[in-house]
Image: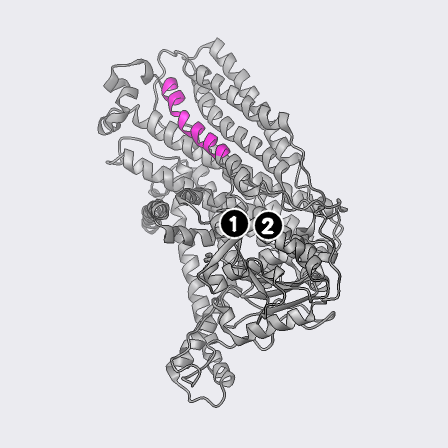
Amino acid sequence: MERVQEHAVTSEAKSLAGRPDQTEPALELLVHGVGGTTPEEMLGDPRTVRITGDDTAAVFRRAADVDAESRPADQRTGPIREAYVWCNLTSGNGTRALWLLLLPFMVVNLAHWMRPTARGRQRTVRFYGLLVRLAGLTLTVLLVAAACEVALDLAAWQCAGTRACAERHTWLGFLSPAMSHDSWWSRPGRRLALAALVPSALTVLLWYLSRRTWSEYESQQPMSRRPEPDDETGHSALGRPGFWYGRRLVARLRAAHTAAGLLTVAAAVTVTAARFDRGPDGSDPLAGLGVLLEIALAGLAFVVVYVVCRRGRSENRLDQALDRRLVRRLPLGALLLLALALLYAGWSRPGWQSSGRLPGDTAFGGIALVQGLLVVALAVVAHLLYRTHPDPRSAMHGLGGPAVAMLACALGGVMSGGVSQRVSDWLDGTGTSIAGPPVLLTWQASVIPTLLVVVLVLCAALGHRTWRLRRSELAAVADDYPGERKDRARTARIASTRAMAALTDRGPLLAAVVSTATLLLGAGALVGAFTTNRTPERAGEEGHAFVHGAAQTSQGLGSWLIGLGFILFVTWGRRAYKDASARRTIGILWDVGTFWPRAAHPFAPPCYAERAVPDLTWRIATWTRATGGRLVLSGHSQGSVLAAAAAWQLKPAQRKRVALLTYGSPLERLYGRWFPAHFGPAALSRLHREVDCWRNLYRLTDPIGGPVRVSGDCGPEVDHEPPLKDPLEYGRTARHPLPAPILGHSDYQADPVFAEERERLLARLRPEVPPQGSSGRSSA
């Protein structure tokens, strides 16, 4: 393999020197989309060779084209074709299934990038990022608090402290005072100290995964370039030198979130022991130690919040610095306080008995309140940014980020509540021996049926609208295939596919309704839990019979739904761990969600674009510099987003050697609407002006791809009009004797228009531009 790569690079470097009078070569660099594919399928040849890259991401060619640059006399019917395969970045081995646990972190990280376009409001933009980072910090605390609820409260405190529960679960016998005859480990503080190892191990595991995935996926340095001023100039920030290299921020956030997780465990243990020490049976010296420990925990928690707020991303330059002292000392300081907390809780306290619940309602209630306030503040800031530069195509008029942040918090709450509810039901088979999870978690589960009703009503309304759109599409299908003998079933099938594809454009409405309902219902659950301090069923006992019945039904149904969701979640993860096809399905979710760098949460799944974009940029720059040839960057679906990001990273002179061919592209339909600050009209228009030429193909039956909507003020319009026909033929023809399939989002290259547009792009590229030399120096 190394010989093949060396031969390919040498051929490129010597191609111009050996044929000074020949026409420059042409290259088509294919980038696949979501779900991945094989190089054999992309290149249409079973014999392919990897010319550069590794097992994770690589560039392939047909075996016959390995040294194509050194054979200019060969008669070619088209450009040299290369395929960049990056699917293993998101759907590799079975451990990727564990990334499902990081779903709330990924969603809140998306909210960071959804801010509206703004000019001249740098402080407001930074404040927006600060709020999202704080929301991400609350999710880490929520996850660790849920682990503390399960391990410390339900298992060690309640079940082990209750004889009936401990007898059903003999593995807890050594922690039970009744079953172990008051053994050393059966003391409440020591039970808590031992159980604290579970959430502590979870926090350390998250730290390890974040550090490991950084080195495997995101440690690729982009090409060196001069720093740029940190201002809004109308072009996308994706072209800044340090956009795809966030090492410094990720390291800082990783240290802060790791410390926050460890401090959460330490606080859960310390507060419980200190509460007893300050009681009538407590010890004054231990009470004093508890106060000192609580002050130390609060002080370090303040430092963690300061570190999260202090620094954002450095995109205008390639920041290779690393705050080594902070990154090392902050988690170690939290670990030291945790050790002191465990030692403090394990001290002998005669007369201390476990009863009731740990103070989990206060903790979960405080987290929920802070999250709600952060989302509201984020909405206010997003609205202010949107007013500075309104864009009618932006999702929810610029409020897409706050809505997604709300959904991330709700998802974290559902996962936390689901785990607690299922473990409680498992430990307490009779439902009478232990107090169960905190009241707030029961209230939050009880509002899920109401939220589900809202979603079902909205889906019914969208279904009705889709049915009406299908009726209008019936006439449009007939007009698109004039002279054909009409088949009602065939026409209905095409019209239905078009109508269903249009549902993608209703995504902002769905997100707006669900996030608003979630915020209101969550606020209601918080008020209900703290005003009654009882579960909904018991709180409704004193009311009208209908109210009591509704509360009882809602609580029972909510508990069942959240338990079912937890089981399905675990089942899906287990299946994905063993089944490669299921893992690819999860990989599609990561293809969209992990395109963006980890700017708000360091424990989110790794950003594959921090590997893929530098790969593409280096390949384009080195090939055009070595050969002086023309290059068509051909991207399908998510590959078109990677292609655009790579084009933004090129030097202007290199960018003028490149043509863009995108098809099935979500650049405007999804990214332009949901991420307007980076893919808005100004950014896409500037990209159109800076590349030599750009053409975009789309179909009305495609639920993902769509038009780019860039005007043609500096060349031909980007979008191919009319949209490509799908299917290619309505009925049977001599060329298509069998019924042509409805392709939707796939197989754009099967359309003859694809080859025509590619040839036009190659013809438009200016071959007279001389090569930039092959000295191998990095671009300045």
Q: Position of residue 343 (x, y in %)?
A: 45, 15
Could you tell whether 691 is left or right of 583 in the image?
right
Q: Position of residue 726 (x, y in %)?
A: 48, 76
Residue depicted at x 51% and y 42%: 604
How crowded pointer 2 is (Cα within 10 Å; few <14, some 14-19, many 20+) is rated as many
In space, the residues marked 1 and 2 are separated at their CA atoms by: 8 Å
Residues 757 and 744: in front is: 757
Q: Earlier in the sequence, mark 1 or mark 2?
A: 1
Q: Secondary structure at mark 1?
A: loop
Q: Is residue 196 magenta?
A: yes
Residues 635 and 472: in front is: 635
Q: Is residue 668 magenta?
A: no
Q: Secondary structure at mark 2?
A: helix
Q: Quadrant of residue 645?
A: bottom right
Q: Which residues are magenta?
A: 189-208
Residue 184 vertical position relative to residue 172 in the rendered view, above or below:
above
Residues 475 and 250: in front is: 250
Dominant secondary structure (helix, strand or loop) of the stretch shown in magenta: helix
Residue depicted at x 61% and y 38%: 247
Residue 648 vertical position relative to residue 261 in the rendered view, above or below:
below
Residue that numbered label 2 is attached to:
615
Q: Quadrant of residue 673?
A: bottom right
Is the C-beta separation of discs 1 and 2 under 8 Å?
A: yes
Q: Position of residue 205 (x, y in %)?
A: 45, 32
Q: Position of residue 239 (x, y in %)?
A: 68, 52
Q: Is residue 369 visible?
A: no
Q: Is residue 31 visible?
A: yes
Residue that numbered label 1 is attached to:
57
Residue 493 vertical position relative to residue 156 in the rendered view, above or below:
below
Amino acid at pointer 1: Ala
Residues 345 and 174: in front is: 174
Could you tell whether 719 is left or right of 729 in the image?
right
